[in-house]
Amino acid sequence: MTVFCIVLALCGLLCLAQSARARPKLGARADVQNSLNVSTCPGYKLGSLKQTVHGVTAQLHLAGSACNAFGEDIANLTLQVTYETETRLHVNIFDTAEQQFTLPPAFFDRPSPPSSTSPSVLNTSALQFNYISSPFAFWITRRSDPSAPPIFDTRVGSLPPTPIAPFLNASDNRTAFDGFNLVFEDQYLQLTSALPYDANIYGLGEVVSSSGFRRSVTQNGTLQTLWARDDADPLDENIYGSHSVYLEHRFDTASNKSQSHGVFLSNSAGSDIMLATPPSSNTSFIQYRLLGGTLDLYFFSGPDPNSVIEQYGQVVGLPAWQPSWGFGFHLCRWGYTNLSVVQEQVEKMREANIPLEVMWNDIDLYHSYRDFTSDPGSFPGDEMRAFIRDLASKGQHYIPILDAATGHTANATDIYDPFTRGTDLDVFLKNPDNSTYIGQVWPGYTVFPDWFAPNAEQWWTEALTNWSTGGVEFSGLWLDMNEISSFCLGSCGTAPGADLSNTSVPVTLPGDPDSLVVDYPEGYNSTISGTSGNITVNGTLTYGAGANATNVGGLAKRSILFKRGLGAAEESDVNLNAPPYAIHNGFGALAEHTLATNATHHGGYVELDTHNFYGYMEERATNLALRQIHPGQRPFLISRSTFPGTGKWSGHWLGDNTSKWSYLLYSISGVLQFQLFQIPMVGADTCGFMDNTDEELCNRWMQLAAFTPFYRNHNQRGALSQEPYRWDSVANASRTAIAVRYSMLPYWYTLFANASTLGTPPVRALFFEFPDEPELFSVDRQFMIGSAILVTPVLTPNVSTVDGLFPGRGAVTWRDWYTHEAINSTSSGAVSLSAPLGHIPVHIRSGSAILLHSKPGYTTSESAQSPYSLLVSLSQDGSAFGTAYLDDGTTLPTDDTPVKNSTLQFHAAGKSVSIAKRGDYNAPQDLAQVTVLGVAERPTRVTVGGKSVARQDWVYTAAVQRLQLSGLAVSLNEGGTISWR
Ligand SMILES: *[C@@H]1O[C@H](CO)[C@@H](O)[C@H](O)[C@H]1NC(C)=O
Ligand SMILES: *[C@@H]1O[C@H](CO)[C@@H](O)[C@H](O)[C@H]1NC(C)=O
Ligand SMILES: *[C@@H]1O[C@H](CO)[C@@H](O)[C@H](O)[C@H]1NC(C)=O
């Protein structure tokens, strides 16, 4: 037995350490018999089960004649079940011959399987694997309650084909469940699990979901397609990123307790994931339909939402350490046509005293829209250098855009070194015949970096270094168009007759005379209010007719997705390189607006298999390049296309949104979604990107986004200017919100340190913190920062109040950030809050203690030069707790050299607050102020470290139960105690 186990364990190691497989053959095969549904697929029979130290392995054999529904059935599969940790169970079903594509381990580090000598959790782990042999099906239960409905249950093979309410229209046959058996073909995999009726499901994306953060399972269900796609944030369609992970939250009405678990399918194939409930059924389902790869599943036991997300982070990698300046305010727009205009923004922001941390440029910067350039006429290199150094001298930073495609030279006299050098180093994607793949993006014809090419990282690092030394001394980079976007179909530049000398932009640009930007936010009437976007006249708000708060928030779903039919390979007009099952890609054909799926990478990988992680590969390469360009410093990256693991290399912005109130609302779900995806540095284009914004929307948005991790105002070419100084009311609102943000920087920084070390999400849905309160499960109009701060933004025009829920059922006291007044809420009902324009309600949870900068400055570094202030909100029993993580804010910790750091702990109990420090980093500032909320009686004596505080240095305000100490100089390095009697 022992010998046997070792052999098996070895095999397990070998199997997992193997390099990824490239597709053995390209194109469709004539011998594939497409049947029109999968209900005849026979499923699998399990045999040769072997118990191992850490789980089981078995063989699965096709249980009947192949159905060859959308490819060829694979006869023999291997099942490998590994109890990896107490909270993580890994179920991997792969083709025994190992011909299917899997993620290349050289680029993705997944946790190693436990070694044969490491302690087994087989009999103690929270989750258990159960199976039946024929037809093979499995289900996952909690060891603590094996008879409860399983958390995942594939025993649905016996169900007949089941119609479900159509997602799109009745003639789209692919939206019915037409079979439930396990299907494992070379070009089609299908796995179905039963869910509780109307389960609470979060995740699966990237998506701008009409149902919000909680996905729709009943009604019309959810059809989440995963195929990275450059489209401007359409509703309910596949967009830039591909994340096949979800969190399910289950509430037990008998015990009034909840438990969460997570399911991650590690697979990069284009897919449809369906959540639905058949008519009059009391069971809901999730069905995965994949265009290839293997069924590599991870289950996380939670049992609460934050721990599910942490456990997912342990598999895909924890988020990158962010430099502290990354939390400052960023300003960008497409349409800053020259350096003077950019300089003017920096000056105007300073004149208006609105903090500006990082100035950005879009593609206006480039010469001929080419990467790694700045236009010699409008952005000369030496002037760029002087401009950026001037910013740096004031503690400010500069970030340029970096497009994924590389311009192709027009002719022999056209000098563009990145292209020539890349050609010499052989780093560009190929056609199947080994010629260079040539598509079209902003610079006209382009080539595309192949991140699998051995020299790609070297070439990319060189090009970035040259760009920086040429004057564009960036602090970080903005990765765009990396889905990867291409404007023509296929390798158009390789086609006979392609005119490579044509370097004009192949599309019309917004703002051009034939493409004017004329739309405004809901409720704005430009015939009444004019075209300026102004809403205030002489200090009061004036509305055009139609400004009606109630009709905002519902953007029409696109009526219909483009479709190729069922079994597309049978159709005459279909590219043979397209797989037989047609996923619901919003653009229809897979190659539309991106590369052909037969584009070929080094090592024989094809775009079909790797498409969804093109962005990931670029993020990884760019992060590694920045480590060389700025040695020892934390790279700062914001990228559009993301994949599981991106958070390790980059942050994300929510893409090309629209200046609409509905998108202000969706931005909250977007930020929450990316907390689950372990890419916590995320935010939306503030004030909206497409269309014109207006004064009121921009005002509310500048305030909301100040409470999201990545805070950037970005605008489209040709739209009304929307820098925060453009309207007085927006300038005021921005100054107010940024001051709150900058005073909270030590808190944000602590939350991100917890994300980078533990995977804990910095921004949280309310139910993450209050998991047993079902009225919170759908809340996505409010959110929490960490466990201590609750934000209740206004999301509609023409209102001066907003309703919010205040969780805790009366056991928590919520105190207003600005006035410290307690909310009077003992029930689970909504509370109406005053929220005039320029005010965003923010509340502090009782029982928390957070470290703040006492004087928010113009930049994050200026803010950090002020002494600290401590805010303590006592719970009803007089206790509170909080921590603060401190380090230098820029040094990149590595496995070999952790950065010097310390963690402060604040404990309140029995009328005193104690401060303790652990770690070797010296707090750069003293503690000058302490505010304690919830002090019920006026103290007679206040002491710090046992010594009385002079009477003029403390104030008690009975109306809000507040004790405020100022003028202190408490060294946080020594710790101490503040008491009152
Ligand atoms: C599948 O496995 C069976 C039993 O081990 C074997 O006889 C058969 O040749 C295999 N089929 C393929 C296609 O590998
Ligand atoms: C698809 O559905 C339509 C309408 O229900 C039906 O007429 C058609 O036969 C179906 N097609 C297939 C291939 O099942
Ligand atoms: C479901 O789809 C139908 C048909 O498209 C539509 O009329 C209905 O409004 C949808 N229901 C919901 C709740 O979205």
Image (tube, rainbow, N blue to C red):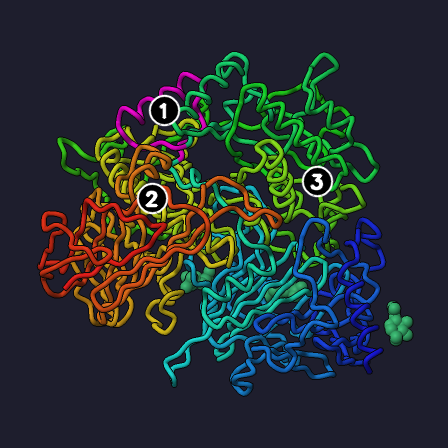
Q: Check if residue 339 falls in the magenta segment.
A: yes
Q: Residue at x 48, y 14 (%)?
A: 383
Mark nearer the N terminus (2 vs 3) = 3
Ligand 3 - quadrant of the structure image? bottom left
Instruction: Note whether ligand 3 is within 8 Å of mark 1.
Output: no
The foreground one among 91 and 951 is 951
The residue singled out by tag 3 in the image is 451
Q: Amino acid at mark 3?
A: Trp
Mark nearer the N terminus (2 vs 1) = 1
Density class for disc 2 (Cα within 10 Å; few <14, some 14-19, many ≥20) is many
Q: Callout 3: helix, strand or loop?
A: loop
- What whole-number distance in Å separates the C-alpha atoms at marks 2 and 1? 19 Å
Image check: 308 left or right of 595?
A: left
Q: Callout 2: helix, strand or loop?
A: loop
Spot the residue most to the bottom.
Answer: 147
Image check: 393 left or right of 472?
A: left
The residue singled out by tag 2 in the image is 706
**Eyeballing the image, is 672 above or below 400?**
below
Residue 971 locus on image (x, y percent): 31, 48
**Eyeballing the image, is 797 above or below 693?**
below
The foreground one among 802 and 10 is 10
Q: Which residues are magenta?
A: 330-357
Q: Residue at x 69, y 36 (%)?
A: 457
Q: Residue at x 65, y 29 (%)?
A: 406
The residue singled out by tag 1 in the image is 346
